[in-house]
Amino acid sequence: MPVGYVFTVACVAVGTLFALAPVRRPQPLATVSYYFGLAVNELPFFAAIWWLGASTSLAFAQGDIDSAGGWAAVTLAAATIPGLAVVARRALGDRARIELAMTEGLGEGWRAAIDADLAAGLRRRLPLARVLFLPILKRRPDVRRVANLTYGDAGRRNQLDLYHHRTRPAGAPIMIHMHGGHYSGGHKNSQSLPLLYRLAGHGWVCISANYRLRPEAQHPDHLIDLKKVIAWAREHAHEYGADPTTVFVGGSSAGGHMAALAALTPNDPAFQPGFEHADTSVSAAICLNAWYRAYFGQGPESSPESHIAPDAPPFFLAHGDKDTLVPVAHARHFADQLRRISAAPVVYAELKGGHHAFDLYHSLRFEAVIDAIEAFAARVRSRERTLQP
């Protein structure tokens, strides 16, 4: 029996099953479902072409399909293909769904309202070669990463990475991203890297930062760290070509919770001990598969919902409808609350078949989300220009 081939096919088949129908409980099975399902859900073409197609071709070429076990693996591989096709079709459809969400949040004709110089740099074509063949490769030759810059006094947990175009164009907007990890794990240089490299390649200055973790740190320690990053960016990012007046803040999962809180509590001295006079306001917030409820065991004041006000900045929210870690109902409720109270635009894109942490790869789904984020940011920047005296 071709053990290696059987193992490869079995992994893809299990991943496809969990991509289509993720499991929430019991916890051990839910953990397996999460990791196997996420990879296949975001990389269905990679799974079909390389994991199944290449391994099957190699098994036949080496004469390994000469037993009942070998033919059973081939049959399982063939049976898995339709499931992968469903996964891919859902992801392809997200582009149209996101476009509809943009129109609902920004209004009819929103693209025409983007300033011509900003609209010129927007991409609307799918980078198919990247998705098919290099979905895991994040880096770009035109982007330089400056690693481990210090923004606070908590050692490695107060370090950030900065990404900028090698030409250092002047007047670059700033994007700050905070990683997820349940507030107890994770690190910079891990999540949303396709987004950060894309924006940096288009002239942005992007920052991905570590922050203090549980249990040693508790709310609002993480939020204070993010506000320190915002203050650091306004003070130092001009050295890399940034415009300190244009700062976007974003995050994934726990990082999205933190980003929403920061966007909704600008210049609040309670969250800026020792740097109360720093400007921590932002142009907009980008929240991906984020948590919007209260912090572990704390009161409602630790929830972004408690801080929504009419003068809240614009928000872009994206959440998978099959997220097993943060229920999609929470994201819908937060979006509804923002729309009810805030006077600023709110885009809520619900991703059909999307799991938690969909922002790890150059996938069909995340490339569509990145295109939307870039267009959303261009619309926000155009809006800011019209509001300037």
Image: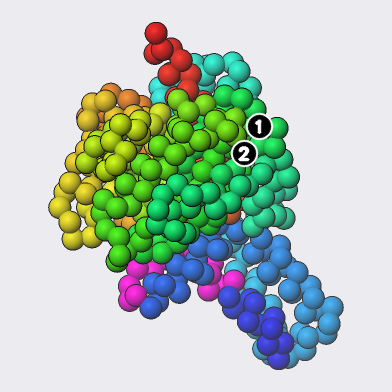
Quadrant where the C terminus sits is top left
The answer to the question of whether label 1 and label 2 lie on touching residues, with beta carbons closer than 8 A, is: yes
Residue type of the residue flagged with mark 2: His
What numbered label is drawn on residue 164? 2
Quadrant assignment, res 347: top left
User: Is 367 left, or right, of 346 in this rendering?
Assistant: right
Q: Which residues are magenta?
A: 12-27
Q: Residues within 10 Å of mark 2 (few under 14, many from 20)?
A: many
Confirm whether the magenta stretch covers residue 19. yes
Asked if residue 23 is positioned above or below residue 145 in the image, the reply reads below
Asked if residue 56 is positioned above or below residue 179 in the image, the reply reads below
- Residue 177: image location, x then y, percent: 46, 45
Residue closer to the observer: 222 or 74: 222
Q: Residue at x 84, y 78 (%)?
A: 61
Q: Secondary structure at mark 1?
A: loop
Q: What predominant SS class does the magenta segment belong to? A: helix
Colouring convention used in this rendered image of the protein: rainbow
Residue type of the residue flagged with mark 1: Arg
Q: Residue at x 43, y 53 (%)?
A: 158
Asked if residue 216 is positioned above or below residue 342 in the image, the reply reads below
